[in-house]
């Protein structure tokens, strides 16, 4: 349990920096995609903003537990293990969630694709961290 908490915390901090920095970078690179977030679907009164900022830690602890349970299945150097871990997570978890999100919400394919890519990159980064901190 200690390894799960430690590696989850490290990955959470790294993903927090990546997520926060990546958001500013993505807005500069793809401004038209982020215009879609002006929809009433995404407007919040600000009372739940802390939940948004906690996301990297929530996903890191969940992925850390998943890693600890299945790490023996991932072979090779840490980069390859991270890529494989990210691919498995993306296919098993992200793809179905993105499918139901697209089918149930008034969102565009580019938006869903960006969420899928973002989640996949997060999982790859977390997988590389886990393969180093909890081999």
Image (cartoon, helix red, strand yellow):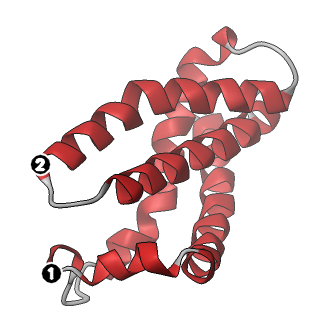
Q: Residues within 10 Å of mark 2 (few under 14, many from 20)?
A: few
Residue 42 sits in quarter:
bottom left
Residue at image location 31% in from the left, 42% down from the top? 98
Indicate the position of residue 44 as horizontal and vertical percent values.
Answer: 20, 84
Indicate the position of residue 86 as horizontal and vertical percent values.
Answer: 60, 33
Residue at image location 62% in from the left, 70% down from the top? 22
Residue on which disc 1 sits: 40
Is residue 45 placed above or below 55 in the rendered structure? below
Residue on which disc 2 sits: 104
Residue 75 sits in quarter:
top right
Residue situated furthest left in the rendering: 104
Is residue 63 placed above or below 43 in the rendered structure? above
The reply, left or right, for residue 78 in relation to residue 1 is: right
Q: CA distance from mark 1 to mark 2?
A: 15 Å
Indicate the position of residue 109 as horizontal and vertical percent values.
Answer: 34, 52
Residue at image location 50% in from the left, 81% down from the top? 31
The reply, left or right, for residue 96 in relation to residue 131 is: left
Q: Residues within 10 Å of mark 1 (few under 14, many from 20)?
A: few
Q: Secondary structure at mark 1?
A: helix
Indicate the position of residue 32 as horizontal and vertical percent values.
Answer: 45, 78
């Amino acid at each position: 349990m200690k390894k799960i908490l430690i590696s989850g915390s490290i990955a959470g901090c790294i993903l927090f920096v990546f997520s926060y920095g990546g958001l500013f970078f993505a807005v500069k690179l793809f401004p038209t995609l982020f215009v879609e977030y002006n929809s009433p679907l995404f407007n919040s009164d600000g009372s739940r903003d802390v939940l948004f900022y906690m996301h990297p830690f929530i996903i890191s602890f969940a992925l850390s537990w998943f890693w600890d349970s299945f790490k023996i299945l991932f072979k090779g150097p840490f980069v390859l293990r991270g890529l494989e871990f990210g691919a498995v997570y993306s296919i098993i978890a992200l793809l179905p969630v993105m499918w139901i999100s697209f089918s149930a919400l008034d969102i565009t394919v580019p938006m869903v694709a960006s969420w899928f890519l973002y989640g996949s990159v997060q999982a790859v980064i977390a997988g590389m961290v886990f393969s180093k901190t909890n081999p």
